[in-house]
Image (spheres, coloured by chain):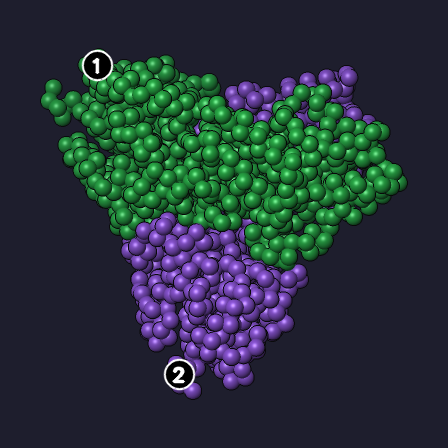
Chain colours: A green, B purple
Amino acid sequence: MTDIEKHQRMANAIRFLAIDAVEKAKSGHPGLPMGAADIATVLFTQFLKFDPTAPDWSDRDRFVLSAGHGSMLLYSLLYLLGYEDFTLDEIKNFRQLGSRTAGHPEYGHGAGIETTTGPLGQGLGNAVGMAIAERLQEERFGKDLVDHYTYVLAGDGCLMEGISQEALTLAGHLKLNKLIVIWDDNGISIDGKVEITDSTDQQARFAASGWNTLSVDGHDPEALAAVIRQAQASDRPTLIAAKTTIGFGAPTKAGSQKAHGSPLGAEEIVGTRDALNWPHEPFDIPSDVLDAWRIAGLRSAHAHKDWQKRFADADAETRAEFDRRYRGDLPATFTQAILDYKKKLADEQPTMATRKASEAVLNVINEVVPETIGGSADLTGSNNTKTPQTVPVTPDDFSGRYIHYGIREHGMAAAMNGMALHGGLIPYSGGFLIFSDYCRPSIRLAALMGQRVIHVMTHDSIGLGEDGPTHQPVEHFAALRAIPNLTFYRPADITETLECWQLSLEDRSGPSVLALTRQNLPSQRKNFEEDNLCAKGAYVLIDCEDSAAVTIFASGSEVEIAVDAHKELTEEGIATRVVSVPSFELFESQSDDYKADIIGDSAVKIAVEAGIRMGWDRFVGNDGLFIGMNGFGASAPYKELYEHFGITKDAVVSAAKEKLAT
Amino acid sequence: MTDIEKHQRMANAIRFLAIDAVEKAKSGHPGLPMGAADIATVLFTQFLKFDPTAPDWSDRDRFVLSAGHGSMLLYSLLYLLGYEDFTLDEIKNFRQLGSRTAGHPEYGHGAGIETTTGPLGQGLGNAVGMAIAERLQEERFGKDLVDHYTYVLAGDGCLMEGISQEALTLAGHLKLNKLIVIWDDNGISIDGKVEITDSTDQQARFAASGWNTLSVDGHDPEALAAVIRQAQASDRPTLIAAKTTIGFGAPTKAGSQKAHGSPLGAEEIVGTRDALNWPHEPFDIPSDVLDAWRIAGLRSAHAHKDWQKRFADADAETRAEFDRRYRGDLPATFTQAILDYKKKLADEQPTMATRKASEAVLNVINEVVPETIGGSADLTGSNNTKTPQTVPVTPDDFSGRYIHYGIREHGMAAAMNGMALHGGLIPYSGGFLIFSDYCRPSIRLAALMGQRVIHVMTHDSIGLGEDGPTHQPVEHFAALRAIPNLTFYRPADITETLECWQLSLEDRSGPSVLALTRQNLPSQRKNFEEDNLCAKGAYVLIDCEDSAAVTIFASGSEVEIAVDAHKELTEEGIATRVVSVPSFELFESQSDDYKADIIGDSAVKIAVEAGIRMGWDRFVGNDGLFIGMNGFGASAPYKELYEHFGITKDAVVSAAKEKLAT
């Protein structure tokens, strides 16, 4: 068997596993695996550094299938290379309930999947974050321990999505030379030829942002190897435009959208077997081909051993710190630092905006947690995400801890996902809450993947004032609370801000959003409490001696209004209590008894929040009172806006009394 | 006064109105108006076709301030040119409650504002839509009636946002040669110099997608005029990179982020008056300068008269049709066509996916409503948005009615906003519901602006099956229902699909989203009803003779489950009724009596929807039952997923009986 024959048979193994799995599932995308099989074969047999027996080896090269619909390409590779999570049975169970081989690659379904992809462009954005993480970690632990590439296979769709521009411009600016993007340039999208919708010269586009660009015949293994070698040697990130034929080998469907997203069908498959000289039964991989793949699976075993030796040679402190960060444990000193600061706050009772409170808290956190990587989408001074510990990263110096992400919310959030997935780092961002809409797809994927990324989102309501309705979140609390496995926090003062930060950092199972104010807020927590009260999601901030006639529920800046209303109602002899609700999600995870107790049985229940009502019926019932927003905000100084929209102490007091009187 | 002196004094009038208004408001962005005043002066005094006395003249040139934070540039222009909505008092009331001069330009606050901007990149996306609309309308009504340019002033932030890539690639592909984007290239963003976050050669980037690119000193009026003339003559869209100094004229803050987003301060203003030789009181525009501007305001009066003459010369039918479409009225035949089709459906009772139902309905609509412009973000065959009437638009032929938007959900939605704002057209899109997240900022702006754009969003739940959780909406119903002034529809069968389409088209006051299934659904509406039942938002689909012990509320595909459960419960002697809930928003707008009647007082209330619970407490109360999703979906054939997640008839029946027994 000549080298080229061997290559072709190995590539065909990918093709037919994809064809057969899609056919069996009666669903899926055979076109990409068939078209990109040559690329994948060259990459995985000659370049990629990985160890199927240790899929989580921290210094492995990362491979991101940004065009996630081609999932069978990845599953085929993982099976052929000997990753134990991906057996032939899993391949046969493609797209079935409970299988590891979901319709799109799902992070966590099996070791070997680096990130969840499918929503186009996200993988590219993740990969930029992974490549940033590699540079950051290399700077911290040295090339002996951290020195790997990040490869991406991206489709036309990935490059058409706007997120791709944010990702590639960030990568180009930061000169992420170990990021290599292979574009599966098959010229086909679902509606037909790409040329019916786009006329972009992608190489020129990438070059305009400082990328090295190369092109190649995506079916020529020698040429592919040559360009990947060139890419590895570049001092800039590289785009390889690999011209391919979608559905390569299919007699009537190759080169057409018909090969993209549905089974080829029995007749076409017969023709494909014929055309590619693959006279084997479905799912049958000849032993010589499987052997060749399994041998390829061993190719980095030596490199891995060498790495283990280097790691063993490192000093004990480095090893411990390296392991701690990659395990995701917080430093031992973390909890005490939080408590010490909480005590200080109980003494000082500062009045400040929660965005400023967050900065003060970050100053404590960043001192004891060296793996945090801060940043902002060009709103550093507004988000207050930068502290003295976090010096900016520059293209030539990754020793810093702060990333000026530019006006790229979506690219930022996707990169943060990649940094978290890479391991060893805890990324946090800065942005305006309104622009959570710009990065929602990436936030959702962080939640789906259970990644610890923390989004600081300031200017969280009409309280931002004059910038007006385009910048005032109204529906965003509800819209973010709606995302499963995302914890949305809206702290009411600096102590709650501290507690919410603590919870965000301690939660390794998913992302957090901290919604913070532009405007000043007084301290509400009068006494030092060792317990993290925000951990309950909702708690009684002010109780009353008698059974409460009125309970006021509020979050964030509106807790101040609730407290003021409580004072007035109490003075009028109406027994009232105040419940602070920093997080709906944490509240829901409490015991039924706790929840019933918090909700209570007051005759009057009022929720106060400068957003829409959606979600608050959980607390006040659908006959309860709600003081908040019914529509978009307006442009004016913020105190006038609160008056204008009737979100005031007086409104709460009147509503309560009116309801009590009925 | 020489020409250059005159120019400078006119430009300085813009600068000082901006400076003074921001100073008075103690809030705002002086830097852009100061930097871009020369560009605006050249554009508005020499090129822009407009008539302040008829701001809505359909053939005016459109000017979009994509960098909306520079709103005082626009307000100053509108005041100086004599737009009556923008008086000096309005300028003095900048950013105050109830003023027309909001923090960012708000469409509808005053005639002369073409679109709401502020969220960066959106204006550029709108402008692409406006330029598409111009070409479409020119093709329909001829150059005599439609022949205008679309100008955009965009900042660095606009060009960094991903949406800009979607917008510019679409414009480049479609060869929108009457779109002229002037990039205010001041090299400054909030965090500092743009070069700390980006290294993109913007001209090369635009050129890579087929744009004409020019560069110019943005403070040189003659050079500016020359490049705008070149741009007008191009056969491609043009990017003019205009090098400017942010905060031009400010002695210490010019050229720095300090000039960007806050008042200059008294001392700096004194220095600026000095530097620019503007010894006038705040808000005082010398009469010669104001006169010069007011004369500029008259510059297209003649062109407008000529246009009126040409319009008067057109045949009566053309005039009537032109006016109808720009008024936004539907054709007189519309209602009957809908009713005729509804009768047919009552006879035929077809079973089909609501995405297919939508296609069938569109076939009726597109036949009688010639101003609809369909499209899809590369999912035409899946969204079923193309009918025989809608031939694709190509770069060389705008006679068609269908736009292959490519994989650009965000660019699509922003362009649709621009098309609707332009007037004369009703744009509708196609996409997967999951990707509403990708275009949410534009959907929100359509809602804020009250624009009639209609989003067809298919594959609306776990019912899409094998593609898995990355493609399965779970929280999206709630997240879209949360957006104010957006109507979210989830029809249960073809008749409801027809009714929801009718409502979407008849609603001129805001956008609509139609969430449609991939999977088949039976007809639920058994009898022909002339009334549009979906107009009530929720209605009794199946009543019971006795007082209902159980009410089942459901939307979309889960209405079938509700109906099946109703059958079984009824057979067991449990009086049950079914309420179909195609739209929460329309339900909320009904009378209190109607709402109370629909919600009723059954002992058991159950909501069934293949999404999260959020929002349903409104119907069932916080002690009511909910059968739906608690988290993300999974990859499997859809019937298995419904079983797996327990969204079944049996689950509804069991839950109802269990609750009845307590």
* A416, B648: nearer the viewer: A416
Element class at badge 1: helix
> Chain ID for label 1?
A
The alpha-carbon separation of the residues under discs 2 and 1 comes to 82 Å
Any part of residue B136 in sight = no
Element class at badge 2: helix
Q: Which mark is residue B569?
A: none
**B150 versus A536 height, above or below:** below
Q: Position of residue B420 (x, y in %)?
A: 52, 57
Any part of residue A212 in sight = yes
Amino acid on which the number 1 mark rests in the picture? Asp
User: Can you identify the residue that label 2 sits on?
Assistant: B3
Q: Position of residue A484 (x, y in %)?
A: 55, 30
The quarter holding residue B625 reads top right
The quarter holding residue A610 reads top right
Would you say B64 lies left or right of A461 here?
A: left
Amino acid on which the number 2 mark rests in the picture? Asp
Q: Residues within 10 Å of mark 1 (few under 14, many from 20)?
A: some
Would you say A462 lies left or right of A90 here?
A: right
Q: Position of residue A350 (x, y in %)?
A: 63, 42
> CB atoms at circles 2 and 1 under 8 Å apart?
no
Picture quarter with the N terminus of chain B: bottom left
* A610, A253: nearer the viewer: A610
Q: Position of residue B289 (x, y in %)?
A: 50, 81
Question: Residue at 54% across / 40% down in the picture?
Answer: A360
Q: Residues within 10 Å of mark 2 (few under 14, many from 20)?
A: few
Would you say B55 lies left or right of A110 here?
A: right
> Chain ID for label 2?
B
User: Can you identify the residue that label 1 sits on?
Assistant: A291
Q: Seen from this angle, which residue lies furthest left?
A: A2
